Each structure stands twice: as C-alpha cells, then as structure tokens.
Amino acid sequence: MDGQQDSKLPSLQVLRGIAAILVVFSHYAMLLRVHGIVGSRIISSGLGNLGACGVDIFFAISGFIFIYTTVNKKGAKDAWIFLVRRVLRIFPLYWLWTSVLFLLWLAGIGLQIHHYSALYIASSFFLFPYYNGENFHPLLGQGWTLAFEMLFYLVFFWAVFFKLQRARIVFVACAFLVLAAIGSLTPSGGGLRYLFTNSIVIEFLFGMVCAEILLRLPVRRNPFWNRAIATALFFVGAAALLCTLRFSFPGSLRFVFYGLPGVCIAFGATLLGSTPAPRLLVFLGDASYSIYLVHSFIAMAYGLALRHFAALHRLQPDATIVVASLVTIALSSLTYPLIERPMIQAISRRKGAYAPRVGGEFFRAAPARRFWQWAR
C-alpha cells in the first residue's frame, strides 16, 4: 500500500488456508455425527457446523480479489484473459479429482450406496447443478461452491468487457438480480433456479465493496491504526460467528449470519497489506484449493474405516476430529506441490498470457530440498 497497490497480500492468503481448514474441520464433525458417534462437545455445541463459514470467507475473498487486481483492466482482451485464467485455474484440477472419484465409484470402492445417471455425471464435470435426490451437489461434493464461483466469474467477465470501472459493483448486483428473476421463472427444483436464486452470491458483493473501500483509503496511513482496525474486525467477525451457535437460521439468510462476519474477517486481513506472514501459513493458503478438493478422499477413507473397525468408535470424538483434521490438512496440502502446481506450470507454458497464476515461493527451489529445509 502506501500509495501503491500491493501485488501480494500475505494475510489474505493465510486466510484462504484458514478457510480451507475450517471446511475440513466441519466435514469431520459431520462425518462423526453421521456415524452416530456421541459425546463430542464440538458437535453438540455447534462448533462443527460453524466450520462451514470457511466457504463464505472464500466467497468474500473472491469478490475482493477481482476488484483489487483488475483496477486497470478493461475491454474485451482483458475480459477474456480474466475468464480463461479462471477457467484454467478451476477446471483442470477439479476434473482430475472428479475423475479419480468417478473411477473409485465405478470400481465399487467409494460411494457404493449411490446410483448416478449419466446426465448427473456429465453435469458434475461441468459444474451445472443437478438434483441427485438429496441436494444439488456434484459427484465431488464440495464442487457445489465452484458452481457459484463460475457464475460470479461469468458475470464479472461482462463488467470488464464493457469497460466498467466505478460501476462494476452496481453492474454485478443488477446482473444477480436479473438472474434471480430469470431463475424464479424456471421449474421448481431445477438447477437454474437453485443457481440463480441462491442468496449466497451476495457474499461476492460484500468482498467487492471491501475492495472499493480499501482502494479509496488515504494514501498514507498509520500502520498502528491498520493493525488496530484489523484486530477489531477480526474480533467482531469471530464474535458474530460464535453468536450463531445460540440459534439456528434459514439457509436463505446465510449471507447475513455467515457472510457478514466472514467479510469482516477478510477485510481485516486486507488491512494488514504486505505485512509478512509465517511462510507455512502462506503455503497453506497457496494449497487451499488442493486441500479443499482432496480432503474428502481422506475423509471418505476414514468413514470406511469407521464402518469396519468398531474400535475407532471408542476414541475420544473431539480429539478424533482435531487430529483427523490436522492429518488430512497435512496430507492433502502435499498434493499442491506434487500435483496442482506442476499442472498449472504445464498449462502456463502452453497458454502464455492466458495462463493462470499460482503461488509457490515456498517451493521455488527444488521441491524436495525445499521441503526438507522447511521440515528442519
């Protein structure tokens, strides 16, 4: 900051990692609840469900980043570069892990109790919501959030295409309203109605507003006040999330009860600017997409173990949730330097200016040597 737009926001990247950790934590709490394991204070208090707010933090970060990083981007060329980069960033890795899950299902190893149609499988690969008898989640369940991400990318593409600057938020908000109106006219229970009328998209707007505020703050600011305001926003956001443990709320108001606290936390992280952050935490932020996609495979393996080994039911449930989450995060994060980053680098060599960008200072040296340097 200090008059120049930061090229990197380490604290925001750390927050990506924290959001992914929250999602993993939430899924393990859900797994133990599904298997009828009792005695967990994490589950009974609602803390397990609270981890789902990681998704809302991700959405707020997306809205922020696309305003913050496209300040000087406008016109057809910049719009296409933006969209192609996002598609190449999202789909190749998603297709890889969806294919792995699909093969496990075909082999009768995973998802054995489900019977999926060819249309559902095709819809899953292209992130088009399709009702599976329970919900609109694709084969790789957490892909439901990516459908909303892609919707936001498509809307934002047109904001850049039409060379909008100050009116981007207004354009995106109006586009969401028009889509909601169109969705309400489509058949009830259909994928378009689910995608276009879900109020969770408002969380992208929250992030966009935060970016506009940040870009208009005075050029010279006191670092002390930056940290003080950031700390206050963290506290307010965390306190508001904890307050949701005291009552239930309809899913249509998720953008209020999870989205507003989530954007407070995200805005606090942006105020820290280029303040250095622990490299391991930044690495977890870089690896957050891999963690988000891969952790379900490890959780699925643990779920199978719970079915076949009764001794696992006698483990202390809260300790199980914490330890299983930590082990899963560690294992799934390793797929970032081993799979995701090499995949993006290979795409980058072919696509040039349209190539997606990916973090990785942590692994800029030879991966094996860098890993052992960190381990020591």
Image (spheres, rainbow, N blue to C red):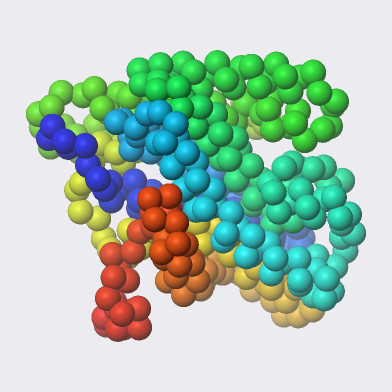
Q: Toward the viewer: 311 or 342?
A: 342
Query: Do we see residue 214 in this rendering?
Result: yes
Q: Toward the viewer: 256 or 62?
A: 62
Give the quarter of the image for residue 194.
Answer: top right
Query: Do we see residue 323 in this rendering?
Result: no
Instruction: Determine the residue positioned at 72% across, 42% down.
Output: 128
Where 282 sits versus 63, above or below? below
Where 289 sits versus 194, above or below? below
Q: Position of residue 293 (x, y in %)?
A: 58, 59
Q: Position of residue 290 (x, y in %)?
A: 51, 62
Q: Toward the viewer: 42 or 232?
A: 232
Image quarter hosting the N terminus: top left
Q: Toward the viewer: 47 or 184?
A: 184
Image quarter hosting the C terminus: bottom left
Decide if residue 272 is on the left or right side of residue 321. Answer: left
Instruction: Determine the residue positioned at 87% across, 46% down.
Output: 133
Give the quarter of the image for residue 371.
Answer: bottom left
Decide if residue 360 is on the left or right side of residue 80. Answer: left
Instruction: Determine the residue positioned at 79% across, 79% down.
Output: 308
Where 47 sits versus 366, above or below? above
| Badge count | 0
Instruction: Determine the residue positioned at 24% across, 31% down.
Output: 229
Give the quarter of the image for residue 176.
Answer: top right
Q: Position of residue 286 (x, y in %)?
A: 39, 59
